[in-house]
Amino acid sequence: MSKATLTKRLEFCSSHRYHNPDWDDAKNRQVFGACNNVNTHGHNYLLEVTLCGEIDPVTGMIINLYDLKLHLWDVLIEFDHKNLNLDTPYFANRIPTTENLALTLWNLLEKHPKLPDLDRIRLYEDETLFAEVTRQSLEKSQSPATAPLTTITRNYCFSSAMNISTELVGAYNYTIGLTIDGPIDSETGQIINLEQLDERVQAKIIQRWNHKNLSLESDFQQTPPTKENLAQIISQTLDGNIPQGAVTRVTVSDNCHATATYQT
């Protein structure tokens, strides 16, 4: 039989607080910033589930879509409109970060008896941040001594111009997507400290190109400011300049609905 993948998206709402009880209040505020707010904060999460299975020759489907929605809600009902710290048993000893929540959802969905095999899940906290768990990444970290490998992707925006011809200048709104792979730190529940990452990206990339004519910048005196070149330069610029890991993928999109990806 032929195999295919199917992706379904569902939204749910939850609140959480980043807090390590082994640290004092000062260190928690230093590491987690506003996410350490004692009153918690909420998100409208978007969960994207990709399944892999054989296509039924009668229905032409991997799984009936109505049944799929019900099966996914069997899991999500535990988290919808809940305080993740207080109302669920999964974060008694773990911080409910986006990474940890994505990994928890993967483990629960994988055990569901009526779902096809999981291939990938993406958990969007908002339009700027999502965590991803894939079967391939988990297979790389099967050793009990190794923390599960996940990815986090952070999006940033800036606006720049470039010379289209000797007489015309075009303006573009760019979105950068930075993907960092790695194990989830047991103390923070994160792959990378997002506040530190934001500071580095602002200093190294955004302030460097925002509201500039890229064709006049030194980075593009020998090469045109295409999205492909932007992605490569961003990766090279951030290599060794961000905390707790390396950027493994850079995507650059513009307001012309085109995207370039640079993979390390």
Image (cartoon, rainbow, N blue to C red):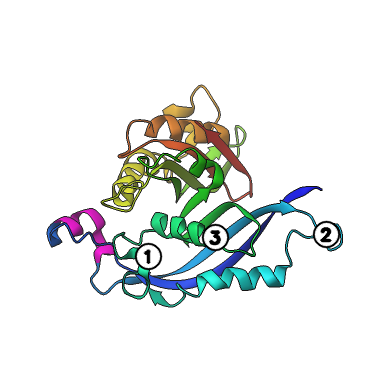
* Count of numbered marks: 3
C-beta proximity under 8 Å, tags 3 and 1: no
Give the x, y percent position of residue 11: 54, 70
- Label 3 crowd bin: few (<14), some (14–19), many (20+), radius 10 Å: few
Q: Name the residue: 42% across, 27% down.
A: 218
Where is residue 145, by image quadrant?
top left
Q: What element carries label 3?
A: loop
For the question of whether residue 126 can be seen, the reply is no
Q: Is mark 2 on a helix, strand or loop?
A: loop
**Closer to the camera in the image, 249 or 232:** 249
State whether residue 12 is above or below residue 170.
below
Give the x, y percent position of residue 174: 52, 47
- Label 2 crowd bin: few (<14), some (14–19), many (20+), radius 10 Å: few
Residue highlighted by disc 1: 90
Q: Distance between the residues labelled 1 and 2?
A: 37 Å
38 displayed left or right of 155: left
**Closer to the camera in the image, 97 or 215:** 97
Q: Is residue 95 magenta?
A: no
Q: Which of marks 3 and 1 is nearer the N terminus?
A: 1
Residue highlighted by disc 3: 111
Where is residue 88, by image quadrant?
bottom left
Instruction: Tell me which segment is drawn in magenta.
Output: 27-36
Q: Is mark 1 on a helix, strand or loop?
A: helix
Residue highlighted by disc 2: 60
C-beta proximity under 8 Å, tags 1 and 2: no
